[in-house]
Amino acid sequence: MTRPMDKADFVFSLVLTAFGLGVVVESLRLPRLAEQNINPYTVPGLLPGILGALMALCGIALLVRSALRGGWRLGAAEAQETQAEAPADEPAPVPDRHVALRLGVTVALTLGYAVGLFGHVPFGLATVAFIFLFTTATEWIELGRRPPLRALASAAVIALFVGFGVQLLFERVFYVRLPG
C-alpha cells in the first residue's frame, strides 16, 4: 500500500530535481572571467553549480526511493482505494503539535538570523549563535524540557566548529567576503 508520504516525496523529488538542474544551468551561464585570468576555482558559478548538482542528486535519490514505494501512483482511483480500506469510524489524523512548533521555531530563528544578525553582527558569530539556538530549541521541543548540559555542550561545540568553519571555507577557499 502506498503511504501519503511516498506520494509527497515523489512530487517533491520532481520539484527538487528540476530546481537543482535549473541552478546548474544558470550557474553555467555566469561569466567565467577567463579574460581576467581569474582562478577557475573562484568563478561566480562554481559554488551554486555544485549545490545545484547536489540538490538534483538528492532529488533523484528521493525520486527512486519514493517510486520504489509506489509514490508514482498519484491518481484519484488510488485515493478512493485507500479511503475504502480505512474504517469509517476512524478519526482523521491530527498533525503532531511538535511539527507545528518546530516549523514556527525554524521560521522565527531563520528570520532572526537573516534580518537581525546577518550584516549587523560578524558572520562567524551570527552563524554560531544561529546554529546553537536552533540546535538547542529543537532539542528542547523534542524532549519537552530543557536539554541536559551534555546536549548543550555538544550544541555549542557543533555551532563553533560549523559557524567558524563555514566562515573559513568561504573566505579562504572560495574567496568570498562575508559581512562583518
Image: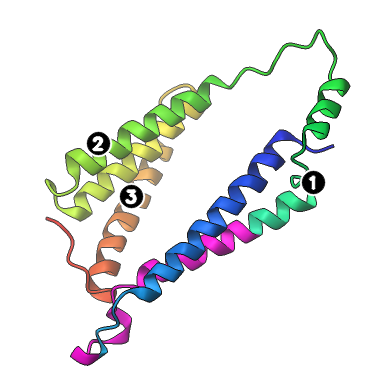
In the shown orientation, is residue 138 left or right of residue 39? right
The image quadrant that residue 150 belongs to is top left
Q: Which residue is mark 2?
A: 112
The region drawn magenta spans 35-60
Question: Which residue is found at the position 18% from the left and 38% from the top?
Answer: 116
Q: Residue at x 36, y 34 (%)?
A: 107
Assess disc 2: are there few (<14), some (14-19) or many (≥20) residues with their C-alpha within 10 Å of its C-alpha: some
Q: Amino acid at mark 1?
A: Gly
Percent x, y of residue 59: 59, 57
In magenta stretch: residue 44: yes
Instruction: Label 1, secondary structure: give it.
Output: loop
**Distance (Cα) linking label 1 and label 2:** 40 Å
Of the pair 19 and 60, the residue shown nearer to us? 19
Kindly report which numbered mark, 3 or 2, lies closer to the viewer in this rendering: 2
Asked if the residues shown at circle 3 and circle 2 are in contact, with their CB atoms under 8 angstroms apart, the answer is: no
Mark on residue 159?
Answer: 3
Q: Main secondary structure of the magenta part?
A: helix
Can residue 126 be seen from the camera position used here? yes
* x, y percent for residue 25: 44, 70
Residue 132 locus on image (x, y percent): 33, 42
Residue 122's place in the image compared with 44, above or below, is: above
Q: Which coloring applies here?
A: rainbow
Residue 173 highlighted magenta (yes or no): no
Residue type, mark 2 in image: Gly
Q: CA distance from mark 3 to mark 1?
A: 39 Å
**SS type, badge 3:** helix
Name the residue rendered at 39%, 68% in the picture.
Answer: 26
| Residue 77 located left or right of residue 152 | right
Give the residue pinned by disc 1: 70
Q: Residue at x 49, y 57 (%)?
A: 19
**Where is residue 37 drawn, in percent x and y?**
21, 92
